[in-house]
Image (cartoon, helix red, strand yellow):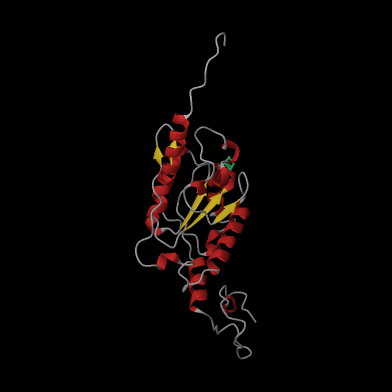
Amino acid sequence: MTNPNDPFDLRELHNADIPLPEGLESNIAATSLSRIYNWSRSRSTWPLLFGLACCAIEMIATASARYDMSRFGMEVMRASPRQADLLIVSGTVTKKMVVPIVRIYNQMPEPKYVIAMGACASGGGPFKEGYNVVSGIDKYIPVDVYVPGCPPTPQALMHGFLTLHKKMEGQQLFQRNSTPWYSRGPADEVPLPVLGPDIVDPRQAEILRHQAEDAASQPEPSVEAGD
Ligand code: SF4
């Protein structure tokens, strides 16, 4: 039987296909390296101390004693991207802010994860058509989990953490496409967007150039006398 005072139960890790002697189920685990690696990583995720707008208040509330992120081993919010492996994009992403967000993301070491918290970070939210707002941070960096709401409650964010844990637990240590950060060579950086009169993603440069050439080759609309 599980000791209710002991938060660590080896049955979380044990492969149920392997029988164990009766009475030792809480003390012995036969498991795979991938499973223990994923379990360790998902129970010690360190989020970046970073917030953008109203959603950040709910993220801060999630870290308070009432909701208690430390139950997930997440209470250490790091002030440096180099020591964090989870970016919670909590709030409206303006075109001005997307540049530092991408820079911060590039500075985080692999393996790293991103949660888009709330309607703004997921798709622009109530400001979607605004001249200064990006329609979702996933236009620039890969997002692992979307948490809906405006704002999402702390419970919703915690559900996002559990969803992220499930994703981590499905990763296989010995499959390159599942854990690409163990491939040879450095990971590709996301190119920094360029902020001018509008925000430009360098990865879209070729498409934008073709669109500009097409627009320039169109005949000028004629103006009728009397118009
Ligand atoms: S989703 Fe709603 S609560 Fe969150 S940052 Fe946008 S406007 Fe604020």
Dividing the picture into quadrants, the one containing residue 82 is bottom left
The residue closer to the viewer here, 208 or 47, is 208
At x 54% / y 33%, what residue is drawn?
130
Residue 164 place in picture, x, y as percent: 55, 61
Is 139 rendered above or below residue 96? below
Q: Where is residue 44 drawn, in percent x and y?
A: 48, 65
Which residue is rendered at x = 59% and y = 74% of the image?
A: 5
Which quarter of the rendered picture does the C terminus lie within? top right
The percent position of residue 213, horizontal first and vertical second, equals 43, 34
Name the residue nearer the viewer: 96 or 227: 227
- Viewer-nearest residue: 201 or 113: 201
Q: Is residue 206 visible?
A: yes
Give the image quadrant in which the ligand numbered 1 is located: top right
What is the count of numbered marks? 0
- The residue most toward the bottom is 21
In the displayed structure, would residue 147 be above or below residue 199? below
**Residue 62 placement (x, y as % from top left):** 56, 53
